[in-house]
Amino acid sequence: MIIEVILGILTGIVLGLIPSLHINFVSYLFISFSIFLIFPNHLFFFLSLSISQLITNYIPQTFFSVPNTENIMSLFPLHRLFLKQQAYDGIFLCFLGSFFGSLFSILLFPLLFLFFTFFIGFNFLISFAIIFTILSFIFSQKTLKEKLIIFLIIFSSGILGLFTLKYNYFVKEPLFICVMGLFTFPLLLKSIFEKNSKTIYQKTTLSILPSLKNSSLYSFFGSLASLFVILVPSFSSSLGAVVFSRFKEKISTYNYLIIFSSISISALIFSYFLAMFFNKPRLGYFAILLSEKLVLFKTDLVLYISAIILTVSLTILILLSLIKDIILFFNSQNLNRLNLIVLIVSFIFIIYLSDFKTLLVFFLSVLIGFLPLIFNKSRVYLMGYIMLPTLLFYL
């Protein structure tokens, strides 16, 4: 097991440093190139790969697709710290949230088991949760104009989701294509074509010293929130963090990052747990592991927990030893040029998976993805792409 975990960690770190490479797309590549046949029955390799890839990906998330401060409301908090020369702080906080979140998610396994056992089959609760979230997004806005803008973003992305997920007869790999169009390409294009006045050199030392008590507390809140996220199909880590922040409106950027990273790692860990006990994964990657018969039986829970702790700890230690050199590398580069390279490589992936009709859908998703940037709103409202089809499925 240890050798598999180490190989998975190293592979996950390499893949995690590639911008816009989601773990679900990694699994598509594994199928396309028959990687699962090369590593048969090596579950811990694929498990540790997904965890280390998730943690490592906070680095490219921080440095790529950063627009100017004029668009600050639609920025992911990591980008806000980047603009303040505090990229190191943001990445370190995500590592901290991932570490504590993984520990708390393990402790919450019994509660997850009870919740899922109780709520399974109660489809109206899932429908209620989605409707409540959508309405809270719309009616939390102060003016009628802002309410209409949020409705437009949710409705347009939701309609796209209906025609590519629920009633899809013509788009190959619609989830990857549309997620790239909605979330990745608009911000990449904006960051490339904006006129940045100067290069923002990042500090290579921490500007803050996070409190362990505060970090563990917000990580625990994140893991608890992830129970809610994982029980409702279509809910994401960022959506869970936004919902939590509405209960605590004055939450700081630092605490938000701890919560977000804790929710993300917990959702990943919970997804495999649900696959293992209920045959109900909430992440496409683990669904593919199930189809490839790479999911362990529930009697192997101790090995699973051991692999989680080992993977998270080693990944963070390796990245902390490299992070200063990585920051120095980015400080010496033209980020616009790197963003352009990422855009080109990502578009090559799109072409690889697309035909003419799929490309039309991709360009439409890019147009919809620009709506939050144009109106200076959070991109989390684009989750209507998954929420609306899921709602209709459970009604």
Image: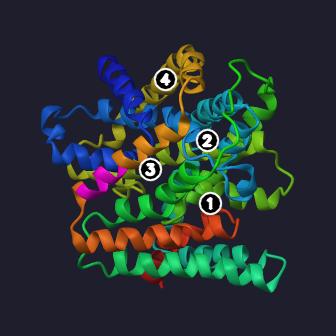
Residue type pointed to by label 4: Thr
Examine the residues drawn in magenta and state their main secondary structure. helix
Q: Pick whichever of labels 2 and 3 is earlier in the sequence.
A: 2
Which residue is painted at 71% across and 29% down in the image? 89
Q: Amino acid at mark 1?
A: Leu
> In terms of secondary structure, where does tag 3 sit?
helix
Residue under label 4, please give it: 315
* Mark found first going from the N terminus, 4 or 3: 3
The secondary element bearing badge 2 is classed as helix
| CB within 8 Å, label 2 to label 1 | no
**Can you identify the residue that label 1 sits on?**
239
- Residue 80: x and y in percent read 72, 44
The alpha-carbon separation of the residues under discs 4 and 3 comes to 20 Å
Q: Residue at x 46, y 82 (%)?
A: 159
Q: Which mark is residue 271?
A: 3
Residue ranking furthest to the right: 250
Distance from the alpha carbon under mark 4 to that under mark 1: 26 Å
